[in-house]
Amino acid sequence: MDDMVTLLEPLIPPLRRYARALMRDRAAADDLVQDCLELAISRWHQRREGSDARSWTFAILHNLAISRMRQSKRRGVHVPLDDLQQEVVAQAPDQDQGLRQHDVMKALDALPEEQKNVLLLVSVEDLSYAEAARVLDIPIGTVMSRLARARERLRHIMEPGAQGGGEAGQVLPFRQRRVK
Amino acid sequence: MNARPISEDDLQAYVDGRLDPARRGEVEDYLDTHPEAGARVAAYMDQRDQLRAALGPVVEEPVPSELNLAHLVEERRRGRHDRFGRSARSWRDLAAAVVLLGIGLAGGWVVHGRVAGPAEGVGALASEAADSYSVFAADRVRPVEIAAADSSDLVSWTSDRLRHPVKIPDLKPSGYRFMGGRLVPTAHGPALMLMYDDDKGTRLVMVTRPMAADRNALMSQTRTGDLTGFSWARDGIGYSLVGPVAPGDLHPIADEIRRQVGQSV
């Protein structure tokens, strides 16, 4: 039991973040995380000894999110985009940064669900490709191809001028970007 | 050097920092000589940074108490959770649990309004405060109707409705920020509910209204489940402070409120 608390507790903030990115509504997201934790607690004994608690718990959350979103789609629940943005992009360090984050969240909305999931798990939650594959229950090859498609699609949404065959004039100095 | 061709997977793994140093060097060389791929990868890294910046603040938020693992484990242990019907219990078990809960609560001099609260006086006020707490403090979307920023509106409106000059106690020295308030209905007319929270997200609720019975009453303590309450009345106005806090921690805050509202407005 203590082992469970030790493993689950540090996962709560990242689970909330993933849920928030999917649901866009703070209360709905936390509700989802609560359901996820309750399920994780009740099924903890079914978990294979030594298996990765993070992918296991994220998989529970992911499955709950999918069924929740299907339900709301059936019910036709729709939350206006601007409300969502304010909810998710809670604090913008400065206005320009805030606008860019607003853009990226808006662009994220335009991605198909399965690309969005991969992108969030890998880019934001820092899951390895193998972990993401376990969470989504898909082969690693599918993770890689969805990730590539998600990133390319996002790029075209955010930079409408972006092209597959870019001209030299638009190319950013690559080495400079990498400093982080 | 050109042993293995650079793949799209290499570029993605480069963005995610998942290449070993040797391969990373090869990818960097490739990107430097292929500006189109370089621009694409730079855009991907920028996306990644922006997504992380946009969503990062969520992990810094205090974890709400509904997601407190110790509480969830405890609730499961008591078998009180059946949101999924996993620990499904019959209605008979549920009824038995409610009866036991009632017996447990009846030990105090006041029990929660829905079980058998006193109909009058500060006991009734304590029940009303506990009810307000359970409805509004649990609300993560709109716990208060008028936010702290509009305190003066809240004061003038509710003073008018309660026919009594209302004062909002300042609990900052005790570590609680004023969130805002709303008017709540009671069997004894309108009451003002004020809500406060601390850095951990713990919320306190204070309810105040004119008193017909118990126009003056000494401070008394109530305990309902995890909820502690302190209630008193003075010159025909009753006050009840409730929160999921140990009595020893809540009592000094109630004393502080009593001191502040006792001063002339």
Image (cartoon, rainbow, N blue to C red):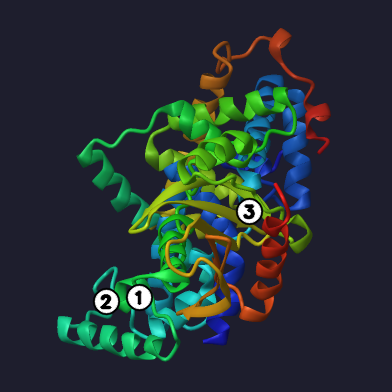
Residue of label 1: B117
In the rendered image, which residue does mark 2 sit on? B86
Q: Which residue: 58% across, 71% down?
A: A9
Residue B59's disc number: 3
Tag 3's secondary structure? Answer: helix
> Which of the two labelled residues, at mark 2 and mark 3, occupies the earlier sequence position?
3
Numbered disc in front, either 1 or 2:
1
Residue B207 placement (x, y as % from top left): 51, 58
User: What residue sits 62% from the left and 30% below the top?
Assistant: A101
Q: Is residue B154 left or right of residue B77?
A: right
Subunit that carries the residue with mark 2: B
* Amino acid under disc 2: Arg
In-image side of A3 versus A61 (left or right)? right
Can residue A130 be seen from the camera position used here?
no
Q: Quadrant of the C terminus of chain A?
A: top right
Same-subunit check for callouts 1 and 2: yes
The amino acid marked with disc number 1 is: Gly
| Residue A105, image x, y percentages | 53, 32
Q: Secondary structure at mark 1?
A: loop
Same-chain check, marks 3 and 1:
yes
Q: Looking at the picture, how far across and down is residue A93, in whole percent? A: 74, 34
Query: In 3D space, how far apart are the residues under numbered discs 2 and 3 (Cα atoms)?
Result: 30 Å
Who comes first in sequence, dot 3 or dot 1?
3
Quadrant in the rendering for residue A94: top right
At x 38%, y 75%, the residue is: B112
